[in-house]
Amino acid sequence: MIHNPNTQPSTVIANRRKDILTLITVEDLITYTQIHANTEQTQFKPFLLLAEERYVKPILGEILYNELLTEFVNVQGNPNLLPDGSTLPNATNYRQLYKECFNVLVWAAYLESIIVLGLNVTEKGITIQTNDYSDNIQLTGIKEMEVRANRHLSFFSKQLVVIVTGK
């Protein structure tokens, strides 16, 4: 059983967590996508929380989402220490739930950040980013990246829905 609906989330902890942790890190995003390790990492942080709010929270629902966040804060962001549902009073397997959310979060954050990878938005308008060390990606390349990310996101989102709803 992944979720015990009789538990109440600690929304105070979950809300405070947003200032401290996200369920995935920029390092996770770099490890599991084509983002190069030398890319400026601070530009990706907003997309991690956006992925949670826009893609995972609607699937889990607010109560289960806040419960997962609370448990994640309780283990200082170490998903290996999340409760596995084997202890009472809460039989929710947060460790499995986190694992199911992980790929959705990675691909959602990547999808939302693709535009940052290839374009600059300045007072002069939108331009393709330049780099002295490599060729620039064209708009068709950005579209191909978006299609690929959408395919992964759709697959993992469907898996998460099945795990959460049993359907």
Image (cartoon, rainbow, N blue to C red):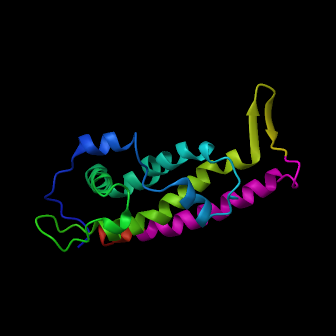
Q: Residue at x 23, y 65 (%)?
A: 3
* Residue 33 sits in quarter: bottom right
The answer to which of 12 and 65 lies nearer the viewer is 12
Residue 117 in picture, x, y percent from top left? 71, 49
User: Residue 13, relative to residue 92: is it above or below?
Assistant: above
Would you place residue 131 above or below residue 97 in this image? Answer: above
Outermost residue to the left? 89
The quadrant of the rendering that contains the C terminus is bottom left
Residue 103: give x, y in percent of width and height.
49, 65
166 left or right, relative to 33: left
Whether residue 2 appears in magenta in the rendering, the answer is no
Image point 79% across, 57% down: which residue? 141
Across and down, in percent, residue 120 comes to 75, 38
Say whether residue 164 is visible. no
Q: Residue at x 32, y 40 (%)?
A: 16
The reply to whether residue 2 is in sight is yes
Left or right of residue 139: residue 34: left
Which residue range is magenta in the image? 131-159
Q: Quadrant of the N terminus?
A: bottom left
Give yes or no for residue 138 being in the magenta stretch.
yes
Please state the horizontal and vertical placement of residue 134, each as a whole percent of the image.
87, 55
Is most of the magenta stretch helix, strand or loop?
A: helix
User: Is 39 on the left-hand or right-hand side of 7?
Assistant: right
